[in-house]
């Protein structure tokens, strides 16, 4: 007899109404597609057909074995509706508009414990080691191996796949398994986070 | 031209002190005047590994405070006339170190010796920072495992930001020793390869030292392993010392032994 143990990622979602759940899943498709959805509440046919159409794997009202749970921040469905702008958000918005003008280029490897915080975009040509961190209000482009953490609230993150890195794009944790291309571009398209491969042509 | 070399690792227990003792002795065997300084104030070990514990009268802190002269505190090695040892204080702690006094002490040592090797304490606290502050170059000792590599990566980061040479606009030379390599495990892919480690740390390789159980016995006896002609680790330290003295010696990859390293070592020490 063959016996294997797997650790999988489960996202638990409470169903208030199926429309907002569909909207939520649509926006976070890239993040959630490799998870098992554990839906709590009553499912209607709309939601069911949506889940099947998208190929989500899900269980409904199932009593799953308990595991370590953490609250995660995902893009809420209502981010595109106007939220009251706090000064901070205005600041981010302004820098976002001026993307490209402030650019920091790092040409040395970033070592464990080194922390780069920058008000614009950051380009790193060397590797980022485990324990290093870049936090940018602009985009982040990493050309070397990434084992450290990247956080960006800019246009995009361009980076190779990473096993250990903790990647946050606009506060959303990007699943490391979603970064499957040789060079990935994490960006918004119609308020949805998507991950696309970047061709060599585009780099040049 | 004298050179101050700090031996650092970040993580403890990877073989900093063993490396300091062997490399210091190795340089002395190459007919260079060399001093090894124990900077691990409060936790001195280098005296034991060099087999000089019963000769310690004065220590480095007493020299810095003017309670003893450098000549009084320096201890000549029994194994080689070119090697001297400056012990750490065992009764004080790392807080006694002051930059100005260290600079003065190192200036004095530079005048007497071609090579000044500083054995840094583990960690990245003040004791570590004081060790690297005035160093011209650093030897980073790692073991082929992730925690050791991350800690040394952090230590290199601090070296690159806090040393005086860097603050003056220069650069500190950094060289890597990968210690305690188990060739059998590397062959099976269970241990990080030297290439992977070099790729992560991105510094020059100084040498590869295989795991050798004889090192423990050598330390207990106060006879550094470099004195053992048959030990692979000893041979590795000899090559490293020659490289530090400016000779071109090719890097030797530790090879897995078909007959088992333990059996061979038992033969050595029986």
Image (cartoon, coloured by chain):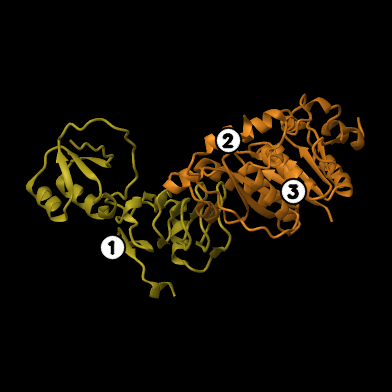
Chain colours: A yellow, B orange
Q: Which of these two is toward me, A79 or B265? A: B265
Say few, some or many: other residues with alpha carbon within 10 Å of mark 2 (under 14 / 14 to 19 / 20 or more). Answer: some
The secondary structure type at the circle numbered 3 is strand
Q: CA distance from mark 3 to mark 1?
A: 57 Å
- Percent x, y for residue A153? 43, 56
Residue B265 has which mark? 2
Residue at image mark 3 = B5
Q: Are marks 3 and 1 on the same chain?
A: no
Residue at image mark 1 = A190
Answer left or right for B15 relative to B26.
left
Q: Nearer the viewer, mark 3 or mark 1?
A: 3
Instruction: Read off the chain for label 2.
Output: B
Say few, some or many: other residues with alpha carbon within 10 Å of mark 3 (under 14 / 14 to 19 / 20 or more). Answer: many
Q: Which of these two is toward me, B77 or A145? A: B77
Residue B247 has which mark? none
Q: Are marks 3 and 2 on the same chain?
A: yes
């Amino acid at each position: 007899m063959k016996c294997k143990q797997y650790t999988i990622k489960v996202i638990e979602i409470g169903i208030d109404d199926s429309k907002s759940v569909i909207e939520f899943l649509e926006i976070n498709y890239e993040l959630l597609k490799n998870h098992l959805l554990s839906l709590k509440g009553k499912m209607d046919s709309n939601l069911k057909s949506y889940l099947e159409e998208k190929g989500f794997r899900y269980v409904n009202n199932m009593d799953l074995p308990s595991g370590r749970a953490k609250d995660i921040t995902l893009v809420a469905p209502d981010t595109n509706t106007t939220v009251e702008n706090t000064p901070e958000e205005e600041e981010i918005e302004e820098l976002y508009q001026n993307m490209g003008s402030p650019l920091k280029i790092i040409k040395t490897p970033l070592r464990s414990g080194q922390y780069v915080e920058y008000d614009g975009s950051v380009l790193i040509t060397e590797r980022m080691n485990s324990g290093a961190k870049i936090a940018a209000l602009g985009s982040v482009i990493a050309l070397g191996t990434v084992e450290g953490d990247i956080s960006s609230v800019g246009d995009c993150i361009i980076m190779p796949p990473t096993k250990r890195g903790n990647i946050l794009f606009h506060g959303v944790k990007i699943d490391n398994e979603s970064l499957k291309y040789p060079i990935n571009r994490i960006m918004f398209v119609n308020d949805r986070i998507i991950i696309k491969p970047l061709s060599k042509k585009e780099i040049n | 031209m004298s050179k101050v070399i700090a031996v650092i690792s970040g993580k403890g227990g990877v073989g900093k002190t063993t490396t300091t003792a062997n490399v210091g002795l190795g340089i002395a065997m190459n007919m260079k005047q060399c001093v090894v300084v124990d900077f691990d104030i409060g936790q001195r070990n280098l005296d034991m590994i060099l087999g000089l514990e019963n000769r310690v009268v004065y220590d480095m802190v007493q020299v810095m405070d003017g309670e003893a002269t450098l000549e009084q505190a320096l201890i000549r090695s029994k194994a080689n006339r070119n090697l001297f040892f400056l012990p750490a204080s065992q009764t004080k702690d790392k807080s006694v170190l002051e930059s100005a006094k260290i600079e003065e002490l190192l200036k004095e040592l530079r005048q007497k010796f071609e090579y000044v090797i500083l054995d840094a304490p583990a960690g990245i606290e003040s004791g570590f920072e004081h060790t690297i502050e005035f160093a011209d170059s650093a030897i980073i000792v790692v073991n082929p495992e992730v925690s050791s590599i991350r800690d040394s990566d952090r230590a290199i980061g601090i070296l690159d930001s806090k040393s005086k040479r860097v603050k003056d606009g220069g650069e500190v030379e950094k060289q890597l020793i990968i210690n305690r390599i188990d060739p059998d495990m590397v062959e099976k892919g269970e241990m990080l390869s030297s290439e992977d480690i070099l790729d992560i740390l991105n510094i020059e390789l100084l040498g590869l030292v295989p795991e050798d159980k004889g090192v423990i016995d050598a330390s207990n006896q106060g006879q550094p392993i470099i004195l053992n002609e048959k030990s692979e680790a000893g041979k590795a330290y000899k090559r490293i010392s020659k490289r530090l003295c400016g000779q071109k010696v090719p890097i030797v990859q530790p090879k897995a032994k078909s007959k088992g390293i333990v059996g061979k070592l038992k033969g050595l020490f029986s």
